[in-house]
Amino acid sequence: MRAHLGDQLVIESPATGAARRDGEIVGLHHEDGTPPYDVRWSDTDEVTFVFPGPDAHIRHLEHGQPRAAREAQPDTGEAAVSPAAPPSGAADPGDIGRRVAAERRRLGVSREETARRARISLNYLTYLEEHPSDPTLATLLVLADALGTTVAALRGGGIDLPPGQGHALLHPRLQDLGPEECRTLLSTHGVGRVAVSASDGRPAVIPVNYAVIDDAIVFRTAPGSVTAAAAHKEVAFEVDHVDDALSQGWSVLAVGPASIVTDRDTVRRLAQEAYTKPWAGGDREMWMSIRPTSLTGRRITSTDE
């Protein structure tokens, strides 16, 4: 007997073969999906530790369906089979599927590897990424762990709130980061903030989509913009990551001169190697480069780790 998270454990009546009790498998204790399991029973909604007997079998469900629709499916009493392949046709992923796929691509991890890490079926993950679906909390927990993110991030919760609203750690540890670790965290791309002096002399901090190419921080902007006015000046560039669930995070600060990239061959190569276009859209085809002369960073962790 082998199962995946979200599958259904069905206990049959020895006399009639009809389903006597069923529940959703919300926890695995072995990587190969063999018993025992943590099961949330449909009749009580309680989670118990179960080692199935001979009167039990696994029903591999179409995980993308809402639970109500799954429970409405007739009990066929058939032996466990692999989930059906996702329906054909144009993919129309839901928000959770898009976020799962985006996190997976950010890490450079294949679907197969993600499914292995999360101990869920590849068919399930494929369906989740390509169709609107309502995965259970147990599934979101293992996916978040496999992708190094949080359930809240996969659900899109707090998207309009600034990070860092969680409680501070009881025993925080603030560590200075060395140059090599700073370079690792800074590269290779993402969203960072450029701190500049605007034309009116006021300080400004502008978020930009950036990449690190040839040890330089590069980003696109528009002529006449605040960031374009930073050319030939020393600027500060900052990137960070905050994990609200764990109240941990890090930040890296790079300081150095900014310049406009004018060489045509270099501009062409930067455009080819860029990971994304500026999210702000518009005419932002002027490349700027920052070559750090100073690179520092800090990380907050728990002293209990």
Image (spheres, rainbow, N blue to C red):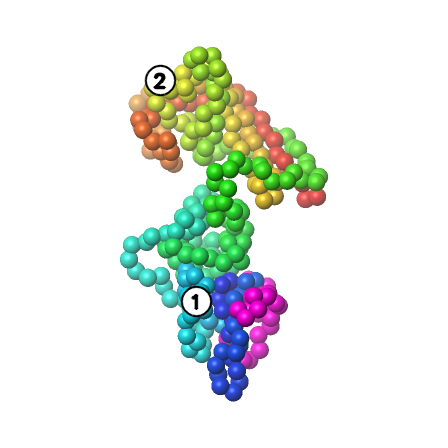
- Residue sitting at x 44%, y 65%: 68
- In the picture as drawn, the residue positioned furthest to the bottom comes out as 15
The residue lying toward the viewer, choosing from 102 and 73, is 73
Q: Does any portion of residue 259 appear in the rendered image?
A: no
Q: Is residue 264 above or below residue 190?
A: above
Comparing 176 with 247, the one in front is 247
Nearer mark to the viewer, of 1 and 2:
1
Give me the C-alpha separation between circle 1 and circle 2.
57 Å
| Residue at 35% across, 33% down | 277
- In the image, what residue type sits under mark 1? Arg
Q: Quadrant of residue 276?
A: top left
Question: Residue 4: x, y in percent?
Answer: 50, 64
Residue assigned mark 2: 224
Left or right, residue 217 beside residue 28: left
Which span of residues is magenta-colored?
29-57
Q: What is the quadrant of the C terminus in the image?
A: top right
Q: Position of residue 186 (x, y in %)?
A: 51, 32
Report x, y in % for residue 243. 57, 41
Query: Which mark, residue 286?
Result: none
Residue at left 43%, top 61%? 66
Disc on the earlier residue, 1 or 2 = 1
* Residue matched to label 1: 70
Magenta region includes residue 56? yes
Local secondary structure at mark 1: helix
The amino acid type found where label 2 is placed reads Gly
